Image (cartoon, rainbow, N blue to C red):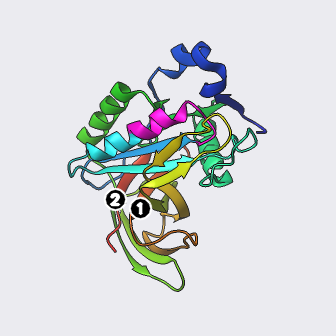
Amino acid sequence: MKGAVVVACGVLGTALIGWALRTESKPAPPDGSARSEGFAVIELFTSEGCSSCPPADENLARLIGDAKGRRVIALGWHVDYWDRLGWKDPFSDPSATARQRAYAAAWESRRIYTPQMVVNGITEFVGSAGGQADRAVAEALAKAGTVALTATARSGEGRGWAVTWAVEGAPEGCEVLVALTQDDRVTQVPRGENRGRTLRHEGVVRAFATAPAAPGKGVLILGAPADVGPDGVHLIALVQHRKTMGILAAIEVAR
C-alpha cells in the first residue's frame, strides 16, 4: 500500500487497543446554505479476511436495526488489502481501499486499518466499539444538515439504475456520490483468519459513482454486479466535501 501504513487489528492485537478505541473527530466541512433533516452515514471499512472484523459487521447490523425510522445510512466498504492473506473477500474492491486512503489523506494520517468505522465523514473509531458508535450516531442525528439533497432512480438498461439528483446550498468543493448497497450477504469462509465461520454483512457497497455537485443537478448511472437481485438492495445518495471528506447531506433514493 504505497503512501499509507496499513494497520490490521487482527494481526497486531491488543497492542493497538488503546489507540484504536479512541474516538477521533476530524476537521468539519464548511456549512452549506440550506437546511435538512439530521442524518448519520455509517461507513465501515471491513474485510472477510480479518478476524477482528465480524464483531464490527455485527455492530453495523445492530445500528441499522436500531434506526427506528431515523435517517441512518450504512455503507459497508470491503477493502482488498487482506485478500492476499489466505482468503479473497468476494465483496472486496480496490476502490473501497482507495476511499479509506482518501479519508486518511484528508486527515493527514498515514494509518488505515480494519475494522474502521466513520460517521458522517468526521468521526472515526474501531468498528466493533458499540458505545462509541451509539454516541457518534446520536450526535450526528441531532445536528441539522446544511445542504438539501433530493434524488430519484429508475431502472436502466441491463442491471443498472439511473439516479437523477438535485442539490441546494452546497458549498464550493463538494461532490455527489450515489451507491448501490446490498443487505443479507452471507459467506461461508473456508480459509484465512475466519476459516470455518459463517459471516453476515449488511449495507455492502456493490457499486458507486460520483460527480461534482457544482451544477446543482445531474444524473449518475450505476451498474450492478451479475449476482445482485432486487431483494435487499438500497440506493444511497450523499453530498461530500472533497477536501475534508465531511458529509453534508445523505438520503436513501426513492425508486
The image's mark for residue 251 is: 2
- Residue holding disc 1: 237
**SS label for mark 2:** strand
Is 115 displayed left or right of 134 in the figure?
A: right
**Amino acid type at image mark 2:** Ile
Q: Is residue 212 visible?
A: yes
The image quadrant that residue 253 belongs to is bottom left
Q: Position of residue 157 (x, y in %)?
A: 52, 86
Is 63 displayed left or right of 30 in the figure?
A: left
Measure how far apart labels 2 and 1 are at the Cα level.
6 Å
Residue located at (48% from left, 83% from top): 156
Residue located at (40% from left, 49% from top): 74
Is 112 displayed left or right of 73 in the figure?
A: right
Q: Is residue 105 above or below residue 180?
A: above
Q: Position of residue 28 (x, y in %)?
A: 44, 37
Residue range (magenta): 47-59
Q: Is residue 245 visible?
A: no
**Amino acid type at image mark 1:** Ala
CB contact under 8 Å: marks 2 and 1: yes
